[in-house]
Structures are given as structure tokens and as C-alpha cells.
Image (cartoon, rainbow, N blue to C red):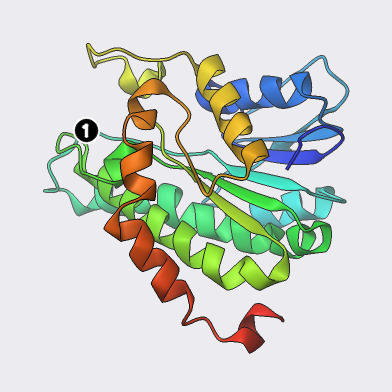
Amino acid sequence: MNISHKSVLITGANRGIGRALLDEALRRGAKKVYAGTRGALQHADERVTPLTLDVTNGSQIQRAVDEVDTLDVLINNAGIAIYDDLSNLDVLEQTFAVNFLGLLKVTNAFLPLLKRSKGAIVNDLSLAGLAPLPIIPSYSASKAAALNLTQSLRALLAGQGVTVHAVVLGPVDTDMNRGFNIPKVSTESAAVGIFDGLEKGEEEIFPDPTSRSIAEGWRAGVSKALERQFAAFVPQRSASV
């Protein structure tokens, strides 16, 4: 998937990794970039079309679909992380509403356009989805669920020309990680790594040095092997719809 001359939609595009992805898509020659944000967004490049898009709001999702004519790449980047200890179910519900259900709702809404273009779905996930970071357990659990969802979508859509990619992000210099005194990559570097992985067709994209350190082990590991085995259970008739 070469981004040049393609149309791309990015959720959570107003700041952090989302904004860096927007700028990197433009740098790589994207034909149009739809920038989904909850608030107002202004951008000087005429290729950018702002969309009011809260991924938990069904009516906003539908209005966004109505504004998009064609779509080649959907990047589900919107997410939240709240420090918690699993004692407050409201935090868990809020986190899953954005990081899991919001991702699925947006994907389902734009899937007809992606099937038409034989496009790609890119879900920005986290190392915390592979092993929990206990100071943000709700976030970790939501990203683990989103990884499983990504793998399921990959198998279900394999026969329909839509590829599905999981971005396994390590520490990135965003607001969410400001409290961690650990090495972090810039949002710009992460965006480059994400698009590089997409253009190489990587199912799991490891876009930064920390995540790349486990890439070989993941790809050769038992979890990846089980994913491939279980994908064979998808009936051929479903895959060809």
C-alpha cells in the first residue's frame, strides 16, 4: 500500500501521533487526508478535509461517512489512557468505548468504501496490548482486546481485498507518556515507521526501536502461529462475500 495518490482517514488527528500521521501522509503524496477530530482543526494544505468525529458518537460517524467519497486507508488512531487500578468500572467502560468499540464502529462504517478500493485498515495499538502495564490496566486490556479484534478482522476480510494491520507502538513522546521517565521516540518518527510498515505490507507493524526489539520473536512465536491456524476456520463462502 503506497500512500501516494491515495485517500486516507485518520481518527484522533488533532495532536500527537494522529497529527504526525496527517503530516506524514501529506509528505508522502496522499491525494486527500480526512482528519477526524472531536474539536475544530485548521490546516493550510487543501488536501486536508477536517471531519468532526468522536468515535463514540454514532451520528458523527455516519455524517463522516456521508462526507467521504472514496477511501483507501483507514487509520484508527483515536484512543485514551487513564491511570487506574480497575476499582472504577466507569473508567473501564469509558476506555473500551473509545479504544475498542469506537475502533470497531468506525471500521464497520467505512468498510464498504474500503472494500470498493481494496484498501487497508491500520489500528494503532500498543505493547501494553501484548503484556499489561499495570498502572494503566484498563488501557492495556482495551488494547489487548483491540489486537484480538484486529486479528479477527484480518481473517474475516482476507478474501475481500482489505488488509488489516496492527501497529504495536512502544513509548512515544505524547501527552499520555509525559509522566514516564523512559526513552521515547518522537511522534514524527513513529508516523514514519507506521507508514513504512504499511508500505511493506507488514501485518504487525513495529514502528519504533522498543517495539522492534520484540518483532522477530512475535512473528516467529506461538501466538502468531495460532492466529494463522485459527484463521483457517473462516469459511470460504464468508471470505468471498
Instruction: Please name the residue shown 27% across and 51% down the image.
Output: 141
Count all numbered tags in the image, as a single digit. Answer: 1
Quarter of image, res 43: top right
Q: Position of residue 57 (x, y in %)?
A: 56, 53
Residue bearing mark 1: 83
Instruction: Name the spot of residue 128 as percent of width and height, x first.
Output: 28, 40
Where residue 159 appears, x then y in whole percent?
Answer: 67, 72
Point out the image quarter for the N terminus.
Answer: top right
Q: Amino acid at mark 1?
A: Tyr
As helix, strand or loop, the secondary structure at mark 1 comes to loop
Q: Which quadrant does the C terminus fall into? A: bottom right
* Quadrant position of residue 201: top right
Q: On screen, 18 above or below 174? A: below
Residue 124 horizontal side relative to residue 67, left or right: left
Q: As drawn, is 238 to the left or to the right of 153?
A: right
Q: Is residue 99 in sight in this rendering?
A: yes
How packed mark 1 is, by other alpha carbons closer than 10 Å (few <14, some 14-19, many 20 or more), is: few
> Where does the image place residue 46, in percent across and percent down from the top left?
88, 22
Q: Quadrant of residue 47?
A: top right
* The one of 77 and 171 positioned closer to us in this rendering: 171
Q: Is residue 95 visible?
A: no
* Residue name at image x 42 percent, y 42 percent: 125
